[in-house]
Image (tube, rainbow, N blue to C red):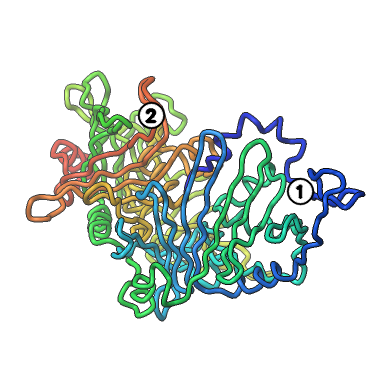
Amino acid sequence: MRKNPLILALSFLILTSCGNGGSLTIKTPNEDGGLEGNAAGDTVEAYDTSKAEKILSEIANNDYYTYEVTFNIPNSETHFTQYYSPSMFFELNDDFSSSIGYAEEYLTGNLFKFYLNDKLDTVTPSVYEYMSGTDSYVKMSNLYSAFTISSFSLIKDLESPDYSLVPLSATKFQITDSNITSILQYMTSYGSSISGYIVSTYFEVLDEATQKIKTTIDLGSNGTITGEYTKYTAETFPLKNIENQIKNGSVKGVDCYDDVKASFDKFALNNYTLSGIKVEAATGGITSATYNVVCTENYFLFDYLNEKYTDFGFVFVNKNKTVTCKYDSNGNEKPTTYTLPYSACYEFEKAKDGTMSFTRLVGPMEGNWKYREVDELPETGSSDTLYIYKGVAYQYTEVTSGEYGFKKYTDWFQGVGDFAINGISASFYIGNVADGMGIFFEKNRSEENAYYTKNTDVMGYFANGLFGWGFQSSTTWMEYIQDCYLKANKNTDGTIQTVDIGLGVMASLDGGAYGKQKIFYTASNFGTSSVPSVEAFLASQLGE
């Protein structure tokens, strides 16, 4: 939900704080009966912990409460209040734009995001939450294991047979139980990331009658994190109105925003023009690379606006068509003619004088396989051949002990958009990689008609499909991607004319200030993109 200010502020102190990282310092009575820090001969009451334990146990069974968290650490004073009820959770931040809520949908139990206005009396629902790597809804029952806000309902785990409290006064106790300390850690929203800094954890009863308590996570010389718990009932809960709307089903999650669905429907046509790459710097200025990519169902053209570069493109050619390329399969400049029994992708180029020619066979060329595109799978086959049938490649192999038959090898290539461009590794066909991903995009509340998602799978697909950065989430560049970005640019009548689509990346542009930059394309001419000169060339060569 937020950057960890503790890690940011204390990163330079990691080495010096290692000595007591993660250990709990227990204060015990001195030999003369005084607590540590008291003078010899002081009279110290043997405080009873049973009342405190009773309060903790009762707190664990409360359904309505708030937990106000304050960070008191060098150069970072984070403050937020969390609102808890059986059906919803809301975190109110000092930076109101980052405040966010999560609710359990009436009847389905599906979890969805929501936002409130600054008066906290009007709710705006957002998209559902999904299990990692899937389109399966997160349910309240599996929230803790599946969801990013691990503090949700954790206070329910405070009920313990042994609280291991060490009394420091009539109302203040030191917590030595590591499980309770862990619960309080996670209720700060930072979880295990602060484990190495914790010196001790304290619990103080502010009002026994109302069960108002204060917790303190002591980080030694690095500061403290305090949490103030306040109990409510269903009638006194500050967000009672929002809770009731959620419970009666009048507020539900958003399956997919209309603009997002309409935009992805346009990309699914596989016919549009991308202009870019554009970069909008953190300061707001926009720079743009000088090329367009014209995508159609059968071919695309990478069109450099700078004439010193040679335009090139890919085309998907049907089986049994004869194509003569400038280079052979090893990249040698040697005219090579192909008449393949399967549909394949070829590269072509457009010289500065406008003439065009095929340059090489792009694929499929997987290993040493032979290929055959068939209308029906034969009764038997050859073990060195892949049989392409209805978009699937089958291998003739042993399927059970001693019995041979056809077994799926892989889904096969359906068009030019299935091939990564040599040297760029992008395909530019968003419809091919983003099918069904519109459900993850939520509305950008600070920019009209703009949407974003932090779903790592979608970020990986966009990084690969648009920019050729690869899918591997472990690579260094993935750490700098903040979100995927989509904006529907409309006419006055509300019709989508163009779509900006790309990524938000933390970077420095041309040596400028480090910050979030948008790197994106603008897509236009949906359903009408074509290059007459390319179509004339393909018709002359292929008769299509």
Instruction: Answer yes or no: is residue 181 visible.
Output: yes
- Looking at the image, residue 49 sits to the left or right of residue 240; the answer is right
207, 432: nearer the viewer: 207
Task: Kindly identify the residue that appears in the image at 66 percent across and 46 percent down.
Answer: 218
Q: How many marks?
A: 2
- Looking at the image, residue 277 sits to the left or right of residue 390; the answer is left
> Picture quarter containing residue 88?
bottom left
Q: Residue furthest left?
A: 493
Q: Which mark is residue 535?
A: none
Q: Is residue 421 above or below residue 122?
A: above
Rounded to the nearest angstrom, the CA distance separating label 1 from label 2 is 70 Å
Q: Residue furthest right?
A: 31
Task: Kindly identify the residue that appears in the image at 55 percent across and 57 percent down.
Answer: 228
Helix, strand or loop at mark 1: loop
Q: Which mark is residue 327?
A: 2
Task: Kindly identify the residue that appears in the image at 42 percent across and 68 percent down.
Answer: 103
Residue 3: x and y in percent read 49, 43
Q: Is residue 252 above or below residue 342?
A: below
Type of the residue with mark 1: Leu
Residue 435: x and y in percent read 35, 58
Helix, strand or loop at mark 2: strand
Q: Which mark is residue 24?
A: 1
> Picture quarter containing residue 309?
top left
Q: Is residue 88 above or below residue 248?
A: above
